[in-house]
Image (tube, rainbow, N blue to C red):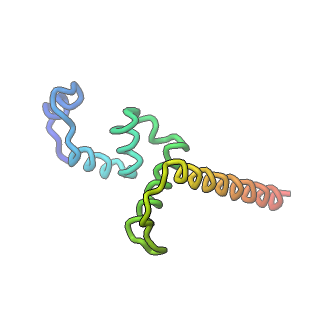
């Protein structure tokens, strides 16, 4: 990636905006997940959040859910859902992940014994 020192300096001093295209190129160069990086940098305003497990789980869930809605592989949702219904579904999905984690940890302990 070719970026002049003056342009980089202006971006770092925030006198020139960091365009979405340039941000994506930087993420590519660093081998970073675009969605997780954008959520960390553009939404949370905390580049360190990229490494947090909570951000990883949230972005992977968001990407997966978005693809399900976009592709309608299992059918499409035609009614307006209340946020409470969506939140409950997310809570149940999280509970399922916790149960899976518990089984994986138990299996790992069994194999180590």
Q: Quadrant of residue 107?
A: bottom right
In this rendered view, identify the residue nearer to me: 16 or 87: 87
Q: Position of residue 50 (x, y in %)?
A: 45, 41
Q: Quadrant of residue 68?
A: bottom left
Looking at the image, residue 110 lies above or below residue 18: below
Question: Which residue is at 44% across, 35% downward?
Answer: 48
Q: Position of residue 26 (x, y in %)?
A: 28, 46
**97 sits left or right of 65 in the view:** right
**16 sits left or right of 29 in the view:** left
Q: Quadrant of residue 7?
A: top left
**24 sits left or right of 89 in the view:** left
Question: Which residue is at 86% across, 57% downward?
Answer: 113
Report the label total. 0
Looking at the image, residue 65 lies above or below residue 56: below
**31 sits left or right of 53 in the view:** left
Q: Position of residue 88 (x, y in %)?
A: 59, 51
Q: Position of residue 55 (x, y in %)?
A: 49, 44
Question: Which residue is at 46% across, 73% downward?
Answer: 75
Farthest right residue in view = 113
Question: Which residue is at 32% across, 48% downward?
Answer: 27
In this rendered view, identify the residue nearer to me: 4 or 88: 88
């Amino acid at each position: 990636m070719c970026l002049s020192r003056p342009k980089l300096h202006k971006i770092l001093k925030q006198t020139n905006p960091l365009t979405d295209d340039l941000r994506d190129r930087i993420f590519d160069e660093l081998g970073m997940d675009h969605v997780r990086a954008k959520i960390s940098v553009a939404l949370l305003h905390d580049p360190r959040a990229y490494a947090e497990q909570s951000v990883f789980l949230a972005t992977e869930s968001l990407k997966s859910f978005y693809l399900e809605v976009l592709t309608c592989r299992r059918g499409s949702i035609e009614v307006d859902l209340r946020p409470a219904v969506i939140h409950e579904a997310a809570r149940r999905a999280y509970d399922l992940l916790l149960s899976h984690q518990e089984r994986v940890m138990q299996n790992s302990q069994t194999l180590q014994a």
